[in-house]
Image: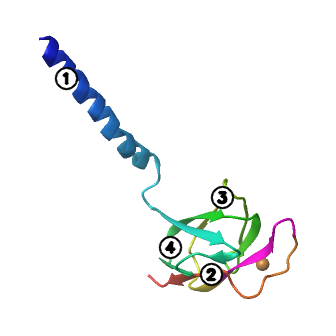
Amino acid sequence: MKILLQSSMACGFMAFFLAGPTSLIAQTDPEVRILSASIEMRKVVGKRTIRVTQGDRVQLNWQTDEKVELHLHGINQKTVVLPGAGGTMRFIAEATGRFPVTSHGFGNKAGHHHGPGALMYVEVYPK
Ligand SMILES: [Cu+2]
């Protein structure tokens, strides 16, 4: 009896443990497309194009190794991204096209001056 009790407690713990990630997923909106991008040495690591479909609700999570203000042109999202804390852009992809993300300055430089070229692009395809 004692052994059975222990094993059922172990199962209960296991079920709780397994339920953890599921309940976390349930808390987020399943209709939001969550994407991420990371900046190192003032460049986006890996893929420099993010493709979404018109009408998508998008959450773009940023990480960086240096403070930067980012501007997603055309979709008009601006966010300050901090090392460790990161930064987030949320938008509904309404217009189709290719939209550049530029820096408005790394470190403590600020203002609306763009770095050389785009850091990456968001492409919105028609439905
Ligand atoms: Cu800008």
Q: Are marks 3 and 1 in contact (CB under 8 Å)?
A: no
Label 2 SS: strand
* Ligand 1 within 8 Å of the CB at mark 2: no
Amino acid on which the number 2 mark rests in the picture: Met
The N terminus appears in which quarter of the rendering?
top left
Q: Is residue 102 magenta?
A: yes
Q: Secondary structure at mark 4?
A: loop
Dot 3 or dot 4, earlier in sequence = 4
* Res 37 → quadrant: bottom right
Residue density around tag 1, few if under 14, some if 14–19, many if 20 or more, within 10 Å: few
Mark 4 or 1, closer to the camera:
1
**CA–CA distance in space, label 3 to label 4:** 25 Å
Which mark identifies residue 120?
2
Q: Looking at numbered disc 3 in the image, what kind of residue is underneath it?
A: Gly
The residue tagged 3 is: 86
Q: Which residue is mark 1?
A: 8
In the rendered structure, which segment of residues is drawn in magenta?
A: 100-109
Q: Quick check: 78 above or below 8?
A: below
Q: Which residue is mark 4?
A: 55
Which residue is found at the position 64% from the left and 71% from the top?
A: 39
CB atoms of marks 2 and 1 within 8 Å: no
Q: Quadrant of ligand 1?
A: bottom right
Q: Earlier in the sequence, mark 2 or mark 1?
A: 1
Query: Which amino acid type is marked by label 1?
Result: Ser
